[in-house]
Amino acid sequence: QKEVEQDPGPLSVPEGAIVSLNCTYSNSAFQYFMWYRQYSRKGPELLMYTYSSGNKEDGRFTAQVDKSSKYISLFIRDSQPSDSATYLCAMSVYQAGTALIFGKGTTLSVSS
Amino acid sequence: GAVVSQHPSRVICKSGTSVKIECRSLDFQATTMFWYRQFPKQSLMLMATSNEGSKATYEQGVEKDKFLINHASLTLSTLTVTSAHPEDSSFYICSAQDQGSSNQPQHFGDGTRLSIL
């Protein structure tokens, strides 16, 4: 079993839809959770960063962490064609000085 | 916000060539930088951890003599792919964390796409 599981998709939705992206993990030591967006041929861009169970909202994005279930989610409201990208979940045990463990990434396509 | 610059963005070269990739933190200092490799439709896989002023730490299966890492200053780490072969073709990405703001996550460069003919 991989440490971080993420359905690669692809996921296709119409503009304006609510998108739900998910990751599960097996290592209960993970304490810090991130969502990155990656456009084709570009490096990952940080979207959300959280370290506690519960919800964190930033504009159209909501990150949700459930440590008891080892499950994290990213919700995108009112999705736009510009949201079309690959979304990577990432996590780490420590806050600083350690590499991130990534999910495989989910490819999202939002059609206008 | 924190910016990590990676150069070059694209390299195409013949088999046997050595290629150097630079990773710079532009507005912060980073004691530690990380080098990842990403194959098509795959996730980022850590290759090595670059430590300023000391030897890099390599992940299992990554040849340290093949992938030379130098972290000579708090804002620059380099990855040299020596005697590159077609199987080394990949997307190489670096990341860094502001050592003055440990409550912030890592920021990534835009990657280097390496194609070995």
Image (tube, helix red, strand yellow):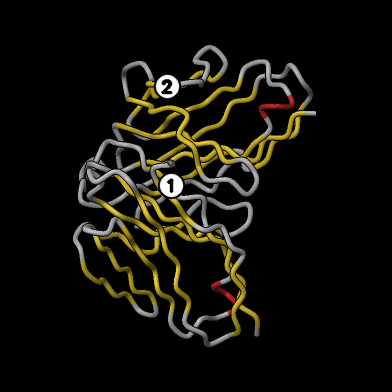
Circle 1 residue: A102
Q: Which mark is residue B84?
A: none
Circle 2 residue: B58
- The residue that appears at 30% across and 55% down in the rendered structure is A33
Picture quadrant where residue A55 is located: bottom left
Q: Amino acid at mark 1?
A: Phe
Q: Nearer the viewer, mark 1 or mark 2?
A: 1
Picture quadrant where residue A36 is located: bottom left
Q: Nearer the viewer, residue A5 or B104?
A: A5
Q: Amino acid at mark 2?
A: Tyr
Image quadrant in which the C terminus of chain A is located: bottom right
User: Dot 1 lies on which element?
Assistant: strand
> Do dots 1 and 2 share one subunit?
no
Q: Is B55 displayed left or right of A104 in the figure?
A: left
Residue B44, horizontal then vertical, whole percent: 50, 42
Residue at mark 1: chain: A
- The residue that appears at 39% across and 49% down in the rendered structure is B107
Q: Residues within 10 Å of mark 2 (few under 14, many from 20)?
A: some
Q: Is residue A4 above or below residue B72?
A: below
Q: Is B60 displayed left or right of B85 in the figure?
A: left
Q: Is B39 displayed left or right of B86 in the figure?
A: left
Residue at mark 2: chain: B
Q: Nearer the viewer, residue A50 or A67?
A: A67
Residue B41, horizontal then vertical, whole percent: 62, 49
